[in-house]
Amino acid sequence: MAGVCVPWGAEACRLLFPIRRELPVSFALPKSSSMIVNDNLSALLEILPRDLRHRLLNDPRRNQLVEVIMDLGRPPEARYLGERGGQYLRNIEVSIEELEDAQELVGEFGADNRAGIEGTLHRISAIRNRKGFIVGLTCRVGRAVSGHIDMLYDLLHYGKSILFVGRPGVGKTTVLREMARVLSDEFQKRVVIIDTSNEIGGDGDIPHSAIGGARRMQVPKPSLQHKVMIEAVENHMPQVIIVDEIGTEAEALACRSIAERGVMLIGTAHGEQLQNIIKNPTLSDLIGGIETVTLGDEEARARRSRKSILERKAPPTFYFLIEIRERDYWIAHQTEKSVDMLLRGRNPMVEVRKRDEEFKVVIERWKSYDGQGI
């Protein structure tokens, strides 16, 4: 079978056989059509008022339910996957008693105003007034989805760090959860999850079965996430660290420290595209950092550029960067090459990974990327 020229790898171009030929014999590529969803929705509905519980249980769209919003003095609202806005569940406004009843059925809220339901992946987030009393709840459905891994199963065999970028609610945490299971159970890696809000492994001391054999370290405060990341490496000898929502300079530096110790790092950051990370001074270190360089006259003429240009300072922490535009539409970058090309004002070559009408994964290589989209 003939090889194909792929613009990824240590050299400018690498000769690879199609994915099924290059995988080790001991691994089989998952079937793209085998999507299995486990949401344990009834446990979340138990904390809601009885009339809302009954309506949502009989809702034909309950499998697309994303979250239920309960704000004091407003009608409760349900939001569904793929729909803009929400839908009111009744005309009667939410009362303080209903909020208090829900609060009693939920675990203790942490410093980040998040709580969970033990044994599930659901997340409850609180809005408080100036006196500290809860006046709103966002009850988000947590789902364990098996089948997402086939969107990037081939990349796992490189053993390289991967950063996922996407807007809130697009499914980044769901992907992390399945990657933890596959890397620990199928690849037999020592995987440690840094679970700041118990969103990856669920609430309670025993993590949800969706993460497989991966270990989970809980974080007492969100501000301590970077310290727990370093602690995991120093104390537990992981081969893979998984962390959600990298958002501070300390966490970005911790990521670089972990990567330099030879540990595979899987993380997420908010943003819709690679350009958001390049322009973010807090997170740009994840892709190597950006600095201004002044060129000599001859070099500027040779490059046909200005004398002051932007360049990458160091190797990127994450070898691959994947933009999750939609749950079934991803854009994959080889980070170093894409960043360098974008800084030079040129369009890098990327992979578009998506599902067709039959839910099979289609990979389109060598697509020209302008920093905004394909």
Image: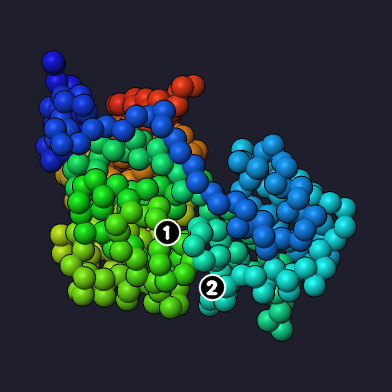
Which of the pair 11/121 is nearer the observer? 121
Q: Which of labels 2 and 1 is toward the front?
A: 1
Q: Is residue 100 left or right of residue 187?
A: right
Please identify the residue farthest to the bottom as the structure is shown.
131
Whether residues under marks 2 and 1 lie with C-beta atoms below 8 angstroms apart, the answer is no
Name the quadrant containing residue 35. top left
Quickly name the residue at label 1: 208
> Pointer 2: what residue?
112
Q: Nearer the viewer, residue 255 or 18?
A: 18
Mark 1 is surrounded, within 10 Å at the Cα level, by few (under 14), some (14 to 19) or many (20 or more) other residues, namely many
Disc marking residue 150: none
Above or below 69: residue 206: below
Callout 2 environment at 10 Å: few (<14), some (14 to 19), or many (20+)? some
Residue type of the residue flagged with mark 1:
His
**Vertical comparison of 163 with 237: above or below:** above
Q: CA distance from mark 2 to mark 1?
A: 21 Å
- Pinpoint residue 51: horizontal percent, then vertical percent: 80, 55
Dot 1 lies on which element? loop
Q: Residue at x 40, y 74 (%)?
A: 219
